Amino acid sequence: MRWKSIGLIGLAALSLMTTDAREETTQFELESPAITQGKRIPEDYTSDGSGDPPPLSWSGAPTGTKELVLVVEDPDAKKAPFIHWIVYGLSPDSPGIPQALAHATEGTNSLGKQDYVPPSPPKGDPPHHYHFKLYALDQAVPLKAGLDELALMSHIQEHIIGQAELVATYARENPVS
């Protein structure tokens, strides 16, 4: 009888450890119904289409996340990295973008504007890689609108507790002669 009770206690402890391990390994993810990891960005979300930002959603933010920050960049640009979009003050409780934009603040992109710059690599360039980086912060960091990436990162660096990333590509064809 003693072995059975130890066995049941052991199984219960193992069950608790498995549950805890599963909770700890929840992965922070950034996804899009329009963009697949490692694949080509649909033309509609580029300068060759409507140029609207793609819809994005997130899940599995680390425990204690108070705010999310999105930076979209192209490290393959001639003046790399080219910053396409910076958005901060995103709620981790929001289902994603575009919903979260109502209460968020935009930073300054590489064109000096507070807006989304759709992918528009030079015609004939090999595919450029677009990194959608989502940072989880342990506190809401009060930031003024219009920060560039360098200023933004200097303010949030000590508060980053997680990062999720979605990478996609885009290339434009050479015009037909």
Image: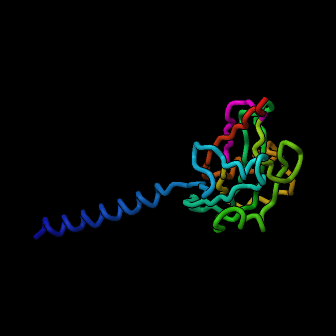
User: Residue 133's x, y, as percent?
Assistant: 66, 48
Picture quadrant where residue 64 is located: bottom right
**Residue found 19% across the figure and 64% down from its top:** 7
- Tell me if residue 91 comes above or below residue 122 in the rendering: below
User: Residue 68's x, y, as percent?
Assistant: 68, 58
User: Residue 48's x, y, as percent?
Assistant: 77, 46
Q: Quadrant of the image for the C terminus?
A: top right
Residue 126 forms part of the magenta stretch: yes
Residue 119 appearing in the image: yes
- Tell me if residue 93 comes above or below residue 39 in the rendering: below
User: Residue 124's x, y, as percent?
Assistant: 74, 30
**Residue found 67% across the figure and 49% down from its top:** 42
Towards the viewer: 134 or 13: 134
Q: Which residues are magenta?
A: 122-132
**Residue found 65% across the figure and 58% down from its top:** 56
Towards the viewer: 10 or 22: 22
Residue 87 forms part of the magenta stretch: no
**Residue found 73% across the figure and 42% down from its top:** 73
- Tell me if residue 134 comes above or below residue 94 in the rendering: above
In this rendering, would 48 be left or right of 66?
Answer: right
Q: Residue furthest left?
A: 1
